[in-house]
Image (spheres, rainbow, N blue to C red):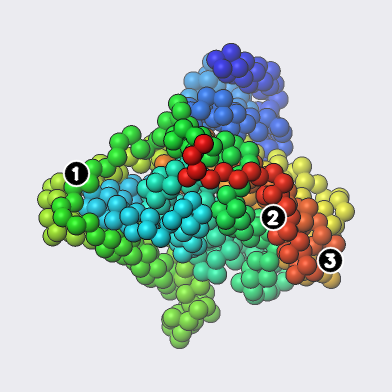
């Protein structure tokens, strides 16, 4: 292990040493780093991802990936060896500080920590155990447990972060009772986070996705109903739809394959819900239940219900403020004349700042949970504050990982990693391959950068003009290409070890991050391949979507039964 790590570091160092820095410095003044450095821009994400799998240490891997990127930037702008290393190291602090200074990122960190405190209060007051015991009565076995988790994931449709942080902690005690591996729970949570939020009719994603669609169409001189185009893309969001179906199918049949099969067999045969030797970031110790008397589900349902209700109120009011402060007269008139219409709710949700809203909602919910616990005599006010702060501490490592992941994304943005990947797409190809290539490149960029939003922003302005140029008289082809952008970005994000949603899903489920990634990746790749072979390619040949979708569902069924083996974790061997 150590020898492989040393060889990798030496290899990267050799690449850095042999970069002709004076030439690069001159060229960088006239061209972007992406066009100058070419494949060298891929080094930071490759190092981070490879080291993560080799060392099993995500923090170290992300740090080294960032460091390699800052050193490359220094060399590319004319720095010498020693100064490049020194300045590259000091630049890491700047990237981390810039990531934390970003209002969106700061809101996410606060949201994560506050929800951690909320969960601790709910657990301490006995609400979490009461909910687990109540669900356990309905969850008679591993099938119903997984289906309940899936349904809860659909119910928290409005935001992928909220989904990852709510569903996992609620279902963890129930899945543990069924002897289900934490990797399987993390997979179901992750598979119902971004894939659901990305296609929900109202969610925190809508405004961004619709805005990208509108801007891209306007760039080619077309004014369209962007939300209507978004709705038309839903049948072409093959990965999202098929992944949700895949979760249900594997839950009902209990068939697993690849690393997930081994994880489920380990849980069944040894009782180890987590792989031996795997560390659980953020779950060093279990929160003590201080509740007195009979446990009540209301100690969980009221705070979590408040979180959801205040989130919806916050999305509306925050988005409304944004609209009223803008110069968009049409939206302002919509808010003033029909404030609670579907269109108004859709627009306000889409334009709201989810990071701030969810932090505010989590804070209010924490106060409610604290007051309920004090009134019922489960803990004193001072003890409740201590429990809340202790709960926040358990997710500090999550915040560290998110900060490093965002910093890595920042250095890749400066290097032009995504621009280089896009440049490989080219502009000469058979039209039927365009949706597939968009989907694949979206997945690669999103996997490498850990951000679906960034990938969508990069590819959408390219996809719509390309699709229009290739088949100007085929609007369905353009819509299909739009769907490929949005879905490919989610596919890559869903598979990436440096994706914030992947990180939060593993933390919420109590799974080791790398174990979650290695068990989820074969499933993601399977659905990704089916999305291409039975989705985008036949659709690009103008086969009706209502024929394509059933064929794709059948392909998923065939894959599960051909590759999978039944693993009932409640059976004794």
Of residues 181 and 423, which is closer to you in this image? 181
Q: Are marks 2 and 1 in contact (CB under 8 Å)?
A: no
Please give the residue where the numbered disc 3 appears in the rendered image: 542
- Going from the N terminus, do you reach mark 2 or mark 3 first? 3
Q: Secondary structure at mark 2?
A: helix
Q: Quadrant of residue 484?
A: bottom right
- Looking at the rendering, in which quadrant would you find the N terminus? top right
Q: Residue at x 53, y 40 (%)?
A: 264
- Number of marks in picture: 3
| Residue extending furthest toward the front | 573
* Residue 152 place in picture, x, y as percent: 45, 60
Give the distance between the C-alpha atoms of the residues marked 2 and 3, in whole angstroms: 24 Å
Horizontal side, residue 266 vs residue 510: left or right: right
* Residue 385 place in picture, x, y as percent: 19, 48
Please give the residue where the numbered disc 2 appears in the rendered image: 557
Q: Secondary structure at mark 3?
A: loop
Of residues 564 and 3, which is closer to you in this image? 564
Dot in front, 2 or 1: 2
Q: Is residue 503 visible?
A: no
Q: Residue at x 70, y 40 (%)?
A: 420
Residue 76 versus residue 451 in the image, above or below: above
- Going from the N terminus, do you reach mark 3 or mark 1 first? 1
Q: Residue at x 72, y 33 (%)?
A: 38
* Residue 548 place in picture, x, y as percent: 77, 64
Horizontal side, residue 225 vs residue 381: left or right: right
Give the distance between the C-alpha atoms of the residues marked 3 and 1, in whole angstroms: 61 Å
Please give the residue where the numbered disc 1 appears in the rendered image: 386
Give the distance between the C-alpha atoms of the residues marked 2 and 1, in whole angstroms: 49 Å
Q: Residue at x 35, y 38 (%)?
A: 283
Horizontal side, residue 266 vs residue 465: left or right: left
């Amino acid at each position: 292990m150590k020898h492989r790590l040393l060889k990798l570091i030496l290899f990267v160092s050799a690449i850095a040493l042999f970069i002709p820095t004076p030439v690069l410095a001159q060229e960088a003044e006239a061209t972007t780093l992406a066009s100058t450095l070419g494949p060298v821009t891929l080094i930071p994400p490759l190092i981070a991802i490879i080291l993560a799998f080799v060392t099993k240490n995500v923090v170290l891997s992300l740090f080294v990936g960032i460091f390699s990127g800052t050193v490359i930037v220094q060399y590319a702008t004319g720095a010498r060896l020693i100064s490049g290393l020194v300045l590259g190291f000091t630049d890491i602090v700047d990237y981390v500080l810039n990531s934390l200074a970003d209002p969106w990122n700061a809101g996410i960190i606060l949201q994560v920590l506050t929800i951690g405190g909320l969960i601790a209060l709910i657990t301490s007051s006995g609400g979490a155990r009461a909910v687990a015991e109540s669900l356990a009565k309905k969850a008679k076995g591993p099938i119903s447990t997984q289906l309940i988790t899936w349904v809860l994931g659909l119910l928290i449709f409005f935001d992928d972060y909220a989904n990852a942080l709510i569903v996992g902690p609620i279902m963890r005690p129930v899945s543990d009772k069924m002897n289900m591996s934490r990797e399987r729970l993390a997979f179901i949570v992750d598979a119902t986070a971004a894939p659901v939020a990305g296609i929900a009719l109202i969610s925190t994603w809508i405004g961004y996705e619709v805005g990208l669609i509108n801007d891209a169409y306007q760039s080619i001189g077309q004014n369209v109903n962007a939300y209507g185009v978004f709705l038309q893309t839903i049948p072409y969001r093959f990965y999202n739809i098929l992944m949700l179906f895949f979760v249900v199918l594997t839950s009902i049949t209990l068939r697993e394959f690849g690393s997930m099969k081994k994880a489920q067999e380990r849980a069944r045969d040894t009782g180890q819900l987590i792989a031996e030797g795997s560390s659980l970031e953020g779950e060093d110790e279990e929160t003590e239940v201080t509740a007195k008397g009979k446990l009540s589900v209301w100690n969980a349902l009221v705070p979590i219900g408040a979180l959801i209700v205040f989130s919806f109120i916050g999305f509306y009011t925050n988005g409304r403020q944004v609209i009223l402060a803008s110069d968009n007269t049409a939206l302002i008139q919509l808010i003033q004349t029909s404030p609670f219409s579907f269109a108004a709710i859709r627009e306000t949700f889409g334009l709201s700042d989810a990071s701030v809203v969810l932090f505010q909602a989590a804070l209010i919910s924490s106060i409610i949970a604290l007051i309920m616990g004090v009134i019922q005599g489960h803990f004193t006010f001072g003890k409740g504050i201590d429990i809340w702060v202790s709960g926040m501490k358990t997710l500090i490592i999550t915040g560290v990982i998110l900060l490093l992941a965002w910093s890595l994304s920042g250095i890749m943005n400066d290097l032009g990693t995504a621009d280089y990947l896009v440049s490989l797409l080219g502009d000469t190809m058979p039209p039927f391959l365009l949706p597939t290539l968009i989907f694949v490149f979206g997945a690669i960029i999103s996997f490498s950068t850990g951000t679906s939003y960034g990938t969508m922003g990069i590819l959408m302005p390219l996809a719509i003009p390309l699709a229009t140029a290739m088949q100007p008289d085929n609007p369905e082809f353009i819509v299909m290409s739009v769907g490929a952008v949005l879905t490919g970005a989610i596919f890559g994000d869903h598979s990436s070890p440096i994706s914030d949603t992947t990180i939060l899903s593993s933390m919420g489920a109590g799974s080791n991050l790398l174990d979650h990634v290695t068990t989820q990746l074969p499933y993601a790749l399977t659905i990704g391949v089916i999305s291409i072979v039975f989705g985008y390619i036949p659709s690009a040949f103008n086969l009706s979507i209502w024929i394509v979708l059933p064929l794709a569902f059948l392909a998923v069924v065939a894959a599960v039964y051909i590759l999978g083996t039944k693993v009932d974790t409640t059976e004794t061997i």
